[in-house]
Structure formats: C-alpha cells, structure tokens
Amino acid sequence: MTSSEIREKFLKFFEKKGHVIIPPASLVPENDPTVLFTTAGMHPLVPFLLGEVHPGGKRVASVQKCIRTGDIDEVGDDVHLTFFEMLGNWSFGDYWKEDAIKWSFEFLTKELKLPIDKLAFSCFAGDKDAPRDDESAKIWESLGVPKERIYFLPKKDNWWGPAGETGPCGPDTEMFYWTGESEPEPLTTGDNKEKWVEIWNDVFMQYDKRPDGTFKPLKQKNVDTGMGVERTVSVLNNCDIYQIDMFKPIIEEIEELSGKKYIFKKGSLGFEEMPDCWAEDMRSMRIVADHIRAAAIILGDEHGVVPSNVGQGYILRRLIRRAVRYGKMLGIKTMPFSTEIASQVVKLYPELKKKEAQILSNLAEEEKKFAVALEKGLREFERLTTVDGKIAFNLYQSYGFPIELTEELSRERGFTVDKKVFEEEFRKHQELSRTASAGQFKGGLADNSERVVKLHTATHLLHQALIDVLGGTADQKGSNITAERLRFDFAFPRKMTLEEIKEVETIVNKKISEDLPVRFELLTVDEAKVKGAIGVFDDKYAQIGGKVKVYFVGDYSKEICGGPHVTHTGEIGKFKITKEEAVSAGVRRIRATIE
C-alpha cells in the first residue's frame, strides 16, 4: 500500500463516520509561542480542544505535516524521522472511548486488513492522579481481543500530556503491530520489544493539569488520535521506512550521487547484517534523505522559513548542514548536491512545486556557506599542536567536523583523539539542546493564559488600526504571542513614522476604552467577504464545508480567527507599542505589550 492510498483510505473512512476533513495547517504555528514547529496534528486544534467552536463541527480529521527535532541525533535508526505526516481524527466534546476504539479497530482490521493475532494493545495502569483505564480494556475485549494481548502500562507509557507544565492531558490506549518473523511475544519482553511497532494512539483528554500539580476533570472531554503515515506504510509493506514510496526515489538519488548502494532487506525493518563500514554508509544515507526532505518541506511551507541562527531558521540550518556533512562522509563530490536530492522531494510533494526555485536556491546558498565553514575549520586544524576530546568537539560544534574526519586528520599528524571525552561533551550538548527544546513548552501545550488571550484580542485591534493608518495593503504576515508581549508582522514597504506609530497606538487604546463586545459568527466565505472580514481567503475553507469563523470586535474589527478572545475590549488594559522594525523586504514588525 502506498502513502497516498493510506491517506485517502483514512480520510474516507472517517468522513463516513461523520468527520469533516480539514486541511493541514502550516508547519510554523500561528500565535503559539510554545513550539517552533507543528509537532502533531492536534497543535493547530488547541483552541477547539479547550472549548472554542470549530467551523467544521465537533468531529474533524486530517493529514498533518509535522516536524520533530528533539531526537535529531537519533535519526538514521529504524524509526526516528524529523519530518513525518500524521493521520488524526478528533472529537471536541462529542464521541468518547467506545466509538474511538471501535473505529480504530475497524480501520486496522477491516480497512488495512491487519491480522488480529499480530496486534497488541496497551492501556493506562492507573496511579495517584487517575484510576486504571479498565473501560478501554473492556472495549478492546468486546471487539474480540484476547485478554493476554491487552497490557496495562504506567504513565510514562500510556499517558499523553501536557506537553509542558500545565494543560489538557489524559490516559491513552496504544496499538502495536508485531514485525518479527516468529510468533508474537509479550509486549513487555525487553529483548523483543522493538519488534512491536506502535502504529496508532488514541488519547482521551479528560484532565487539566493545574500549576499546583493536581489533575482536574475537563469540562469538555476530547478524543485526539495520531497515526504516522510513514511508519504505517512501512508496517503494511513489511519493509524499512526508507524503502517506502515517499523515500525510495530520494535514496536512489543519493545512491547515484555517492556511487554507493543502500542495501534493502525484504521482510525486516532493520539493516541486513553487514560490515560496520557498510552499516555506517546506510545510516549516513538515511540522515541525508531525512534531513533534505525535511528542509525542502520547511522551505516550501506557506509561512516559509529561511536558514538563520535563531528559532525555526536555526533548526533548518542545522538540518541542511548535518545533511551536507553526512553527504561528504558518503563521498559525494557534486556541489551543491542538496538541490539534486530536493528536486526528488518536490516530485513527491507537488504542493512544493510553486516554491521550487526558492527551495533550491536556499539549499544551494546554505550548502555554499557551510563549505566555507568547513574550509575555515581545516585552517583551524592546521594550527593545532594537539587534538583532545574537547578540541574535537569544538571542531564539530563550530565547523561541523564529524568525529570521523577529526580522527582521520589526527591520525595523519600522529595525534590521538580521546573519543570518550568527545562523547561526553557531545552528551552535554544533546542535553542542552533537549532542555532548550523543552523550554518551548514552558507555558503548557499552548499558553492560553488570561494575559495571552488579552494580547491575542489586541492583535485584532492592531491589525485594523494599521489598515486605517497605513492603508489596505497592511496585511498580516504572521504573529507570535507570549505572556510578555505580542509580535505582529505586516506588509508595508517602508519604516513607519513616529506619528504613524503613535496614531495606531492611540486608535487601539480608544477601542479598548470603548469596551466593545467581542463575538464570533460561523459564515460562508462569501458572507464573510460581504461583511468586510479580513484574513486569508484560500482554498482551505472549501474543505471545511465552506465555513469560516469570524470574530467581531464591536463594529470596528472583523477578522477570520480560531480564538480564544476576551468578551469585551475593556478587559485588555493599556496597549503600548515598544518597537517597530524591518523583518524582510516589504515586511515590517511591531512589538507591543499591555499594562
């Protein structure tokens, strides 16, 4: 079964179950300071999981592009990917465990035709915060699953969320498929646990973790599910992930460029037994394939990111440079070679075609910059009189030198590298990276604190005020809100004058002082246009029954938005613009706060 076939089969199945199919959101989250990228299908749906009304109703399903880089150093093994697609279905306070589990079972056994004797299921074992999930286990049993294939596991295995310190969370039930050639063994057997591949996860969001560490029942119970496209296709075809249709052309291009062969083994998710040097080549090919695919898709996103030293741009730069480094280790001489591989990615994802030139030019430029960094690193190496583990790590971190290159150059000069010290420094680096990533989640799944909600509403007033002062071309290009400030990007060809900034600030504060009511309506696209709503009208809305959610701030602002918002503008407080600056050609940025 191909990737496109499983996407189509999944969406049609849940459409028949009363779900509205919604389009994928951007990889760059809007108004969510807790993540750099969309990491799961539920991220764009947070307001609706917290009670906001979704234009599509209470049942939706989608195929969402996701980026996860917390385990970037583990990419190259059998299961880790930085970019993947997630199939998901959601209930916003509608159906609950019985329907969710029954439909999951039906899809796995009827639609995908997976044999029940190769499936296993896990449920939450219970602890001081929540009881054992016997309800889910009994539902699995009622469907014909033997008791011995249902396992109760602790919170670390069968509890989802919150992503940060607070927020929606709850027990989950996970579905596993046996990929071994022998008869399935118990799911908890250590030596064979890797042969049980998790293919689906049904999360039952029924608790809200509070700042004091307690778990309170949510007013609205939600179902949130996730099934990885790549992993499922791999299981269905009994092959490793890099042999599926969405990777094979990329791997073949890498084979052509490197002159080396990727050894596929049918009937196994792992490498065939081979000499260590061959296995290392296979790992390098996987890293190049994964990272260039992820980079091309990030560059081609609707809110396109470019390589830089901060935020999303830093992650993108790291992906590209890591891919280039491993390409050099494979012996690829072509430069730039990343563009050759990315061309295959564009063929696999036609939606990238309109940005192909931009994708390829950014990759070529970044590869060129990295080549210069490597050259500087070589000059630095020539000045060294010794190379210890810490110096080796500095060469890796500052110039992108893989340890293998440092060892090779050191041998030529009679140096010995203490690899244990290097590995210790590397582990510290990994821990710092993970800590930094975790910091993105400090406020919880998405920070919907009272202050953030006030700032979110203030962006609507700011957007309309900018249009009033600068003209109708001051369209929003992006925003980011934390509890401390709002950041609003908009189209404008020049720096704003001090008088213009003051006038915008005055208008916003006037509308706040008028204590205007804030409400929303579900409208068709045509109705929204007639009423003068601002926002992006694109083909996505046709996929949600043609309905859009429009927030009205009195009669002043009318804007497409998911929410949440205050009920009256008087709740916002005093609005203050702290900075106006350039972002890129034709795009300006305002930073503001409330007092």
Image (cartoon, rainbow, N blue to C red):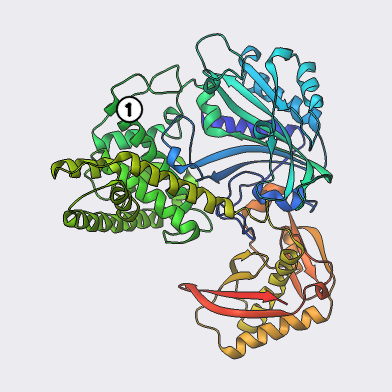
Quadrant for residue 264, please give it.
top left
Residue that badge 1 annotates: 279
Q: Tag 1: Cα neighbours inside 10 Å, few (<14), some, or many (≥20)? A: some
Secondary structure at badge 1 equals helix
Type of amino acid under label 1: Ala
Using the image as rendered, state which of residue 375 and residue 21 is in the foreground.
375
Q: Give the farthest residue toward the top.
A: 183
Q: Is residue 268 above or below residue 49?
A: above
Q: Residue at x 38, y 50 (%)?
A: 320
Residue in the image at 28% along x and 41% along y: 418
Q: Nearer the viewer, residue 190 or 60?
A: 190
Determine the residue positioned at 19% across, 57% down.
379
- For image coordinates 21% across by 44% down, the residue present is 333
Task: Provide residue 10's location: percent of width, then percent of height.
Answer: 64, 32
- Tally of numbered discs: 1
In front: 520, or 238? Answer: 238
Vertically, is 88 above or below 266?
below
Toward which corner of the image does residue 109 lie, by quadrant? Answer: top right
Judge from the rendering whether residue 468 lies leftward or rightward of residue 37; answer left or right. Answer: right
